[in-house]
Amino acid sequence: MKFKKITAVIMAALVIASFSGCGSGKGGDDTSSEPVKLLDTSDMFSSRDIESGYDESECTVIKLSGTKASVKGEGASVKNSTVTIQTEGTYLISGSLDDGSIVIDADIGDKIRLILDGVSINSSNGAAINVRQADKVFITLAKGSENVLANTADSKITDDVDAVIFSKDDLTINGEGKLTVTANAGHAVVSKDDLVISGGTYAITSQKKALDANDSIRIAGGSFTIDSGTDALHAENDDAAKGYIYIADGTFSITAGTDGMDASGVIQIDNGTFDIKTGGGSANASTKKGGERNGDWGNWGGRGRKQSGSESEKAAATALSAASNNAKSASAAKSGGSSTESSSAKALKSDSSVAINNGTLNIDSSDDAIHSDNQATVSGGSIQISSGDDGIHAGSSLRISGGTVRIVKSYEGLEGMTVDISGGDVSVVASDDGINAAGGNDQSSMNDRPGQNQFASQDGVYIRISGGKVSVSSSGDGIDSNGDVTVSGGEIYVSGSSDNGNAALDFNGEATITGGTFIAAGMSGMAQNFGSSSTQGAMMVNVESQQGGSEITLKSSSGKTLASFTPEKAYNNIVISTPDVKKGSTYTVTAGSSSTSVQMDSLIYGSGGGMGGFGGRGQMNGGAPGGNAPGGRKGGRRG
């Protein structure tokens, strides 16, 4: 909710990060007025990344047997229960090691291919598969095979080797078999360069991260069931052209203690099916019922968290502070930051940008569902969100141009410095603001908003709706901008708060409507109307108090129904605009059983109450000081 008062503030300049393009990454300068630069996917996957066939006659054959192994062919040697591969080639591996490993220590230009055909390796001394040196390693899961790799809880984990599958060089996993990876200590799969997965079925359980890469994670397909103590997918690099996550297709069932996907670079999803649950889900929200701050919220990370019965939601909701601090320290150590940086439990989180072009996403997140420190776009697909904090948050620009977005639970639904909706079907349920354009950092999840975060009108901050269908049900402001609101098309329906401290339409700059259908119902205390710069007629009407479920209809003088909407919550104020509302005509607005006749003597009829009754930008062309509280974001990259 926004406290309606004018607060003098001095606002630091907002610097929007940019990233440069390269053959495998992003391109162009990035500003809030430009579209997100998508990844260049033309050479994302090589033919060898995809190829899963092999000729057994050309393979060196390695057979594992308990505490020993045998080699038939060239390029590999055995010492005790360690198999070392030193020469470029293809290696067909089967059998099991009770406590051992496959080590690749080849020349820097060598390409090594491992065919896993019914392999089971347990390791207490580092990784089950350890790539010390090669140009690139391919792990192919033989068709129909089941393979199991694991380490022990007391496995020797070091900074040099901290995963069940660990590679210092490029790593590709493909094929038509199944791979189960259990990291009882450390991470499941780590590549210090690129990690590519193009097929296979995966069951991954990890004490820390499931999939981790320095340069990129690229997934062309496959089926993934992931249960990670910290991030499920994590890519991080100081080079702005790297540290990205690209998913072309696949099926993902992700349960993560912290973030579902976390990238310093771009996160781009072109297709796939995703079920993502983070931090115990939205049941572990930032605020409890009634607005009380949830003291457990923010204590994410680590598989050492308390268990309560068999419900995973309770496990994260009662997370141990020690486990959270461990996650913070580990993250800070990797990024060179301090241990005061906080962990987070977002479904998709990027320092750069998030682009969803297609796919089906079902998200249940304790923290923001989709979060970008810079830009976020949705151009297609189907997204359903239940969030304990923001539904979709962008530090600079948020754009929705297509697809279906259903935010069924959130603190704030859509938030960005600028919010553009030009297409798609968008519905938002929020316990605070539905759609919020706010400069500065975001601390919207916190219930103790400091007074210094109250802003007057901010240049460059806006909400702009030019197409699509938008439905908002909010307990705070419905559509709320620290700057301007512009509506030029689409259908917009707002069921605002049922208290007088919020408005269905709230802005600090100017609100203009030139097209589209707009109906907003709320309370009259802070109500605002569109302003005199509008070219389409708009009316603000106070009506008798109505309960939720009382239909609103707008009819012409001839009795033709021009628009209708049924708000979910109580209201006594309505703002309506459609292309049929013309100056000089008379209309009837019906709310429940109450009807009001409106004579449009001017293009804008009625102005809101605002502070002291000076209202919105209606006939009086006055400026209501309806303030917004964008708040400060949670601080630091890792937060």
Image (tube, rainbow, N blue to C red):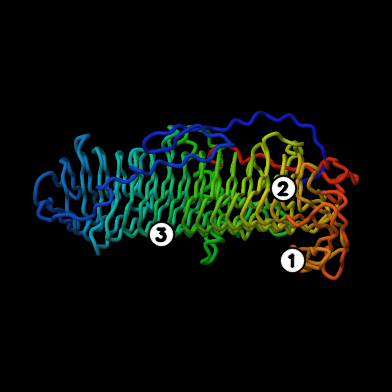
Q: In the image shown, does 368 or 25 lie closer to the viewer?
A: 25
Total of numbered circles in the picture?
Answer: 3
**At which x and y percent is residue 626?**
80, 44
Residue 621 visible within the image = yes
N-term-proximal mark, 1 vs 2: 2
**CA gap, disc 3 and disc 1:** 38 Å
Which of the 4 image quadrants contains residue 571?
Answer: bottom right
Q: Quadrant of the C terminus?
A: top right
**CA gap, disc 1 and disc 2:** 24 Å
Determine which residue is flagged by label 1.
566
Determine which residue is flagged by label 2.
514
Q: Residues within 10 Å of mark 3 (few under 14, many from 20)?
A: some
Determine which residue is flagged by label 3.
251
> Relative to 225, is 55 on the left or the right?
left
**CA gap, disc 2 and disc 3:** 43 Å
Q: Residue at x 31, y 48 (%)?
A: 165
What amino acid type is highlighted by mark number 3? Answer: Thr
Disc 1 is placed on an element classified as loop
What amino acid type is highlighted by mark number 2? Answer: Thr
N-term-proximal mark, 3 vs 1: 3
